[in-house]
Image (spheres, grey):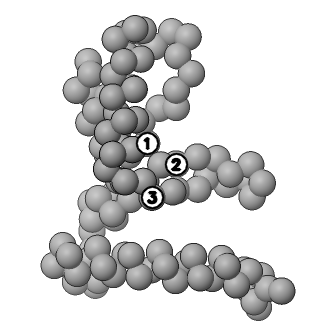
Amino acid sequence: MSTPNQATPNTVKAYAHDVKDWFVFLSAEDLDRREVRLKSVGEFLAPCLGYLNHEMNHETLVPIDEDLSEAIAEQRCRLHERRPDGANVKSAPPRTTTERQTSDACR
């Protein structure tokens, strides 16, 4: 069964959870929702892993914890050490601010 906008109840619950997380983030950063800048949105999304959801044919962001984020960054550095030119490395380009900073740090 779906709601009038064709979202399933589970999707609506997931959206509600995301909105709650957004407001918790704003509160923790002492930001007013009416004065949010793009930088804040990037900081909110930084600890997420992006992947292509083939079933729904769109990119999805999945929150990840700090340990996983660090493990991904370490693996990127190991790959960069083995293949500085990037040849034969099947790794997606950095998507988050943290990944870009780690990529830059490995150079």
Q: Residue at x 37, y 54 (%)?
A: 65
The earlier-in-sequence mark between 3 and 1 is 3
Give the spatial CA distance, label 3 vs label 2.
Answer: 9 Å
Query: Which is nearer the eye, 57 or 28?
Result: 28
The earlier-in-sequence mark between 3 and 2 is 2
Give the spatial CA distance, label 2 vs label 1.
Answer: 7 Å
Q: Residue at x 42, y 53 (%)?
A: 64
Q: Quadrant of the N terminus?
A: bottom right
Mark 2 crowdedness (10 Å alpha carbons): few <14, some 14-19, many ≥20: some
**Residue 93: image location, x then y, percent:** 47, 32
Foreground disc of the pair 3, 2: 3
Q: Is residue 36 above or below residue 88?
A: below
Q: Among all residues in the image, which is located at the extreme front?
A: 67
Mark 3 crowdedness (10 Å alpha carbons): few <14, some 14-19, many ≥20: some
- Identify the secondary structure beneath mark 1: loop
**Residue 77: image location, x then y, percent:** 33, 22
Which of the numbered marks, if any, corresponds to residue 95? Answer: 1
Q: Residue at x 32, y 39 (%)?
A: 70
Q: Quadrant of the C terminus?
A: top left
- Identify the secondary structure beneath mark 2: strand
- Identify the secondary structure beneath mark 3: strand
Do the residues bearing badges 3 and 1 touch, measured as CB atoms within 8 Å?
Answer: no
Q: Residue at x 55, y 10 (%)?
A: 88
Q: Name the residue type under label 3.
A: Pro
Q: Among all residues in the image, which is located at the extreme left?
A: 30
Residue beneath disc 2 = 50
Q: Name the residue type under label 1.
A: Arg
Residue beneath disc 3 = 63
Q: Name the residue type under label 2.
A: Gly
